[in-house]
Image (tube, grey):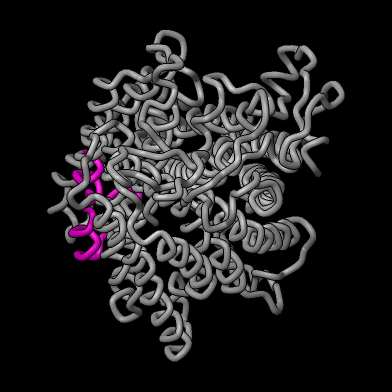
């Protein structure tokens, strides 16, 4: 779709560089805020929905951390919240596993995939490449509403009599193929599978839109080598999503067939209650292959946008060009390519042939190389920079710290011999949360703090922002670093109670410490939530004088303070240079749209 079709408004009044400018019809509340086709409003819808889900998913983790940290105590308020699932103030075992399942699903898919990528891909791609909107605003709107519908289906499962799905966020068969279906009540897992199918449709619609917009709708002079690293990261993220999420969709559909149509894609002969249930030819390992073919690229679907945001924020607030621009782009490509070749390192304990396992060990260790290149380039950009410690910059630096410390433990888990001991222990929880979960959340916070003035025309309160950072940063290490030691001792994850295990009684005090810290860190997120919504209405206003508050070079800051649907009210500026001209020829920054002088030095 070309830009003449982007906005359903009055006839064209001016043409500029292949783009169309329109006079706008008055929009109703519904068309402007609900079923909006403006990429900026859709990005805010993704962000607000992601925040709601982050609160719900984080709250679930607090609840099951109460069980893990204080297994012998009762909490009467739990019965008030969850009813029969928490009789006497203690979580029912089955509901504990349901909360663990929902926590993982919500944070991985609804917050760190849709909330992070959906928000910033939507907001920044058209603004930073010089387009008036996405290639297809209508499909863009549909992508959000499929996500919203998926979230409603998932949330509804919480109110089922049998409870939500409780097979873990990886929903491995045979538990997910039978599980809650043993007593004839299939609701929880069916809701989970339906929700994920709807979510995958959302990802595919969004990803195709992002790819098309970046490749086909760049303004004059915006060559691929002039794209900000944010846009490069969103492009590779979209490509990964389009190529891998359909594999999970096929896995979900086949699992639904096993549950309802009597097929046996994932089921072999099993014994329940002394009776043999024949299911010839099925293999639960098949599901693991299909799941992790998406599951490991999903790590980078989450991490790559955070890497792009971090690159942009660090360069801007170091007042230096990003070090090794083409190396950064190349490392994005290498990470995206290698991510297709490492999925089975999650399956070293599944009975895999050791020779085949060595293949996945090799590529798992190789993928650390482009990640190390990115870390080196970030640190070199920071080196001797004129660093401005804005809230966004602190979270970007926090991302680098967490990515390094969490990534180093991935070398342990990528070694098949070590993984035999560490698999499914708290070591995996610590690694997974640091390198992907918390690190990517820090990337998301960096983006929100950095582009909040552009999104809402106001500034967030810096004091609350700094408090939010330091409590979250210190708390993240206090929560997950001790888990490495528990994992090395063999403590298995997803267990309801360790109090009667002689081998793990020594960790009772440590589990209590982790739980208390988790509650504090969760509470600190309400500083962000209050700051976010309060600043939306009461924050210091952006003015013409400070509408580019961080002195950035990229194109989004050339639009009006409150960009209309169409972004630029006149011609879209032409791009003349790359996006990281900081500290060049004695100047603090030079915008991408400023022509190159005859006597100007090359970057």
Horizontal side, residue 153 vs residue 59: left or right: right
> Which quadrant: the C terminus?
bottom left
- The residue closer to the viewer here, 179 or 219, is 219
Image-quadrant location for residue 202: top right
Horizontal placement of 498 versus 94: left or right?
A: left
Left or right relative to 200: residue 396: left
Furthest toward the top, the residue is 538
Against 407, residue 32 (above or below) is: above
Residue, far bottom: 355
Instruction: Locate residue 579, reporting x and y percent.
Output: 45, 47
Residue 506: percent from left, percent from top: 12, 53
Between 323 and 113, the residue placed more toward the observer is 323
Residue 100: image location, x then y, percent: 44, 45
Q: Outermost residue, right direction?
A: 11
Image height check: is 222 above or below 538?
A: below
**Residue 61 or residue 268, whichever sits in front:** 61
Residue at 19% x, 39% y: name it.
474
Question: Could you tell me which residue is drawn at 27 percent across and 53 percent down?
Answer: 381
Res. 241 image quadrant = bottom right
Magenta-colored stretch includes residue 391: no
Which quadrant is the N terminus positioned in?
A: top right
Indicate whether 120 appears above or below 233. above
Q: Is residue 70 visible?
A: no
Q: Is residue 463 visible?
A: yes
Counting from the top left corner in percent of width and height, residue 215 is at 67, 54
- The span picked out in magenta is 475-499
Observer-nearest of 241 and 594: 594
* Depicted 448 relative to depicted 461: above or below: below
């Amino acid at each position: 779709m070309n830009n003449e079709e982007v906005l359903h408004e009055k006839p064209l009044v001016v043409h500029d560089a292949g783009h169309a400018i329109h006079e706008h019809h008055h929009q109703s509340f519904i068309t402007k805020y609900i079923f909006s086709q403006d990429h900026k409003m859709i990005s805010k819808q993704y962000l607000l929905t992601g925040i709601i889900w982050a609160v719900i998913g984080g709250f679930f983790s607090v609840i099951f951390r109460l069980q893990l940290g204080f297994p012998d105590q009762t909490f009467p308020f739990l019965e008030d919240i969850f009813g029969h699932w928490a009789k006497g103030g203690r979580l029912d075992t089955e509901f504990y596993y349901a909360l663990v399942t929902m926590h993982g699903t919500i944070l991985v898919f609804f917050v760190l995939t849709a909330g992070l990528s959906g928000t910033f891909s939507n907001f920044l791609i058209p603004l930073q490449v010089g387009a008036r909107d996405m290639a297809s605003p209508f499909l863009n709107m549909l992508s959000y509403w499929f996500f919203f519908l998926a979230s409603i289906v998932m949330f509804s499962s919480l109110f089922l009599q049998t409870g939500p799905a409780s097979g873990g966020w990886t929903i491995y068969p045979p538990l997910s193929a039978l599980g809650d279906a043993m007593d004839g009540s299939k609701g929880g897992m069916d809701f989970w599978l339906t929700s994920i199918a709807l979510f995958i449709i959302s990802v595919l619609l969004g990803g195709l839109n992002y790819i098309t917009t970046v490749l086909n709708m760049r303004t004059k002079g915006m060559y691929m080598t002039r794209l900000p690293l944010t846009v490069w990261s969103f492009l590779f993220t979209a490509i990964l999503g389009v190529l891998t999420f359909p594999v999970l969709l096929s896995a979900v559909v086949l699992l639904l067939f096993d549950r309802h149509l009597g097929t046996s894609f994932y089921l072999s002969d099993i014994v329940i209650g002394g009776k043999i249930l024949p299911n010839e030819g099925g293999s639960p390992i098949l599901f693991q292959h299909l799941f992790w073919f998406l599951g490991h690229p999903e790590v980078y679907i989450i991490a790559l946008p955070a890497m792009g945001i971090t690159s942009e924020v660090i360069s801007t607030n170091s007042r230096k060009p990003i070090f090794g621009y083409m190396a950064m782009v190349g490392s994005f490509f290498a990470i995206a390519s290698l991510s297709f070749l490492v999925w089975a390192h999650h399956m070293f304990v599944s009975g895999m042939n050791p020779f085949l396992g060595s293949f996945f060990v090799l590529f798992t260790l190789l993928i650390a190389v482009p990640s190390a290149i990115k870390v080196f380039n970030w640190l070199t950009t920071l080196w001797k920079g004129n660093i401005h410690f804005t809230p966004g910059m602190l979270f970007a630096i926090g991302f680098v710290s967490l990515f390094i410390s969490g990534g180093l433990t991935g070398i342990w888990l990528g070694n098949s011999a070590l993984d035999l001991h560490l698999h499914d222990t708290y070591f995996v929880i610590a690694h997974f949360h640091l390198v992907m979960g918390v690190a990517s959340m820090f990337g998301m916070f960096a983006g929100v703090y950095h582009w909040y003035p552009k999104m809402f025309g106001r500034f967030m309160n810096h004091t609350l922002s700094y408090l939010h950072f330091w409590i979250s940063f210190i708390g993240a290490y206090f929560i997950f670093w001790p888990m490495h030691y528990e994992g090395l001792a063999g403590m298995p994850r997803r267990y309801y109670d360790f109090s009667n295990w002689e081998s793990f009684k020594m960790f009772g005090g440590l589990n209590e410490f982790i739980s208390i810290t988790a509650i504090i860190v969760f509470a600190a997120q309400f500083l962000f939530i209050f700051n976010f919504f309060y600043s939306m209405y009461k924050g210091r206003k952006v003015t013409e004088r400070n509408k580019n508050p961080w002195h950035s070079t990229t194109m989004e800051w050339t639009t009006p303070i409150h960009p209309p649907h169409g972004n630029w009210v006149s011609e879209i500026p032409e791009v003349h240079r790359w996006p990281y001209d900081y500290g060049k020829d004695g100047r603090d920054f030079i915008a991408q749209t400023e022509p190159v002088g005859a006597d100007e030095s090359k970057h």
